[in-house]
Amino acid sequence: MAAGTLDLFCVGLNHETSPLEVRDALVMNESEVERAIQALRERGASEAMVLSTCNRTEVYARGTAIEDPSAFVASLLREIKGMDLSGKEGRFLYTYREPDSVRHFFRVACGLDSQVLGEPQITGQVKDALTLAARSGGTGPVIDRLLGAALHAAKRARTETAIGQGPVSSVYAGVSLAAKVMGSLAEKRLLLIGAGEVAGLAAAHFKDAGVTRFMVANRSRGRAESFAAGHGARIVSLEAIPVVLPGADIVVTATASPHAIVREEMVRAAMKIRKNRSLLFLDFAVPRDVEPAVSRLPNVFLRDLDALGAIVAQSLSHRRAEIPKVEAIIEEELARFLRWHRSLAVVPTVTAFRSSVERIAQQEMERHRSRFRPEDHGALEALVHGIVQKLLHRPTTRLTRAEEEDPDGIARIDAVRDLFGIDEEDSDADRNPR
Amino acid sequence: MQLILPLLTTLLPVLYGLSAAGYARVYMAEPGILNGTGGHRGGPILLRAAVVVHALYLAARGFAEGHLPLASVYDFLSATGFSLAVVYLYVEMRQRIRTTGIFVIPLVFFLQILSSAYGASSPALQPPIRPVWFELHTLAAVLGYSAFVVSAIYGILFLILYRDIKANRLSFFYERMPPLETLGRMNVSAAGAGLVLLALAIFMGMGWASVAGVRFLSDPKTWLTVIAWLTLGFAVLAYHRLGWRGPRAVYASLAGFTTLILSRFAVDLFFHSFHTFR
């Protein structure tokens, strides 16, 4: 291997290349990730990391000992997960070599490769992958640096662009709207009408947003009790809704009722009692649980599924418009990372190159020393040293700048190593000071 | 002093103009994007600098002239701009919201540029000798008017945002505004502060008029101001006691503000009043 070659590869699959059942079958737990990293290390990878989430399983490793990374990772997955990806299922796998592997990792960290564009959870998952790789002995200077650079790119993407802005689910759109109307939700009271999956999701999102007081009304008492136990909610009967409505600030409805449960006159009466303080209805039911006429009342805000869907669509479109800005950030960070990575090869190459020339000069001087008078030895050494330094000056300077002169610089380092027969193993040892 | 005052007169509109540009940048940026980058601090820092310079300017004028610098309409414009900036800064620091600066600071800039451009060329008025609490009456009135202007601005912002939310319109404006209830509170709090200041101004003015033998009860401005004060007082009272919320509360406070402004113009255009600015 030439010292300057960039050797980080990535093999994996994600939600775009593979169906859910394949991704599900390949999700690795911690011990499986450790086994994979060990196997990669035994096979000659100097560093390795596995990123395994519900939407992707990707192997990142360094080292050219693995000649066919895709086949190797396929066999690794067969061994660890029992899934054969060597045949036609091999189409699920993609392979990237540096610099594309680095670019791909940055895209993943910035949320560009996520199923929900710009979602932030991937940053935490990337950090977890590094922690696990470090514990399994897979990390080294390059993967450590790669993660730092990826997190920096992700942070820049979030602070300098709107890639993470705006709600991307109907429930979260409802939470955002509540915050837009009421500000802090800490003191607000949430009434959930229905105790199914959507109500549970809404309760969880509003809890994350600071709501602590929940009431739940449901036709089935048993289900309401189980919901209340899970979310710390107070149970009220459906018949008591007109009584508790004045005390609620946000009402989430998600029932299978064939007719409206919340009627306009009920809300009108509640608004009088609550002295016209804002009241928000989020109606996730089809058919709707809240009469549309409610939205005409002052200080009452009503959103049904269509309205929330429109918010999500607008938000996603806004995020998509930010992709070029994030890609520009990724290219900047990629260039910085590659400069650093290439610079790793420069110092050992320059040292080895200079040593090689100086060793030849020294050998020749020793060979001919007897032909000079002892009192001339000093002058001879000075002469040879001077010639060698003058000859080495320009190549040394040009090599030192090699990493700045992409892409010719790297070829120059390779050429020098080839021309002067600089030992590859020494170089590898120099580049991996662990 | 003769060197410093012209310098400050020129510097003030420059500082307010730059801070208005800074607040425009905050408003135009993607919501949440400038946070943490330092890009959102330019406007607020420049505004603080402008307020300090403005305070020095007013103090220097007061020191040089021996009375509060409120002798002409241009002085009044400058003092109104200053108090608007102070009231806005107070609200900004309290609510930690900077995206509304674009709706206030350009007005301050406009007032100050008028004052700086025309005030220097207008003949200097020699104000009559007035007791200090007459000057305090003027000062309280200027601060009160500024608070009402800020209240009206937040009231209008409230109405626009309310309409956007009702229509499920995620507009450029929607994304940059603070929560609706916060705007409502800003509207009513500023109106409350304005009420207190205007009440002080009215009482101090009446006190001074009694001592000076001026028949203030026959002055239309006194009555129109009291009517405006009562309208605004009702709006604030209705918010706190009658449960008026949302557009109704805002319309009430805007009605009071409109009465106040119209009363000023009505007095100048149709009535003879003993206290008008020239």
Image (cartoon, rainbow, N blue to C red):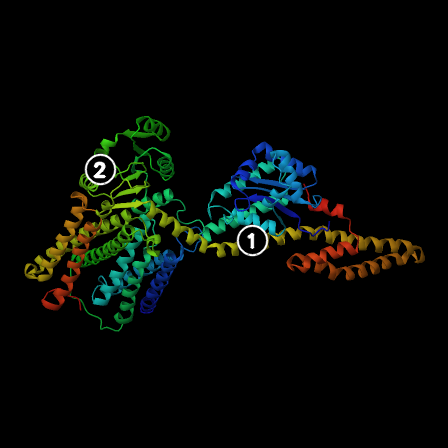
Q: Which residue is mark 1?
A: A333
Tell me the quarter of the image containing the C terminus of chain A. Answer: top right
Protein chain holding label 2 = A
Q: Is residue A309 above or below residue A401?
A: above
Which residue is painted at 31% across and 28% down in the image? A220
In three-dimensional space, the C-alpha distance between marks 1 and 2, rounded to whole angstroms, equals: 54 Å
Residue A246 circle label: 2
Q: Depth-wise, is mark 1 or mark 2 nearer the camera? A: 2
- Image x and y of residue A265, in percent: 18, 41
Front one among A116 and B181: A116
- Image x and y of residue B267, in percent: 12, 65
Residue A324 at least partly seen: yes
Front one among A78 and B103: A78
Residue A414 circle label: none
- Amino acid type at mark 1: Glu
Marked residue nearer the N-terminal end (1 or 2): 2
Front one among B166 and B41: B166
- Image x and y of residue A299, in percent: 23, 46
User: In the image, is B43 to the left or to the right of A427?
Assistant: left
Q: Is residue A296 above or below residue B74?
A: above
- Residue A368 quadrant: bottom right
- Amino acid type at mark 2: Pro
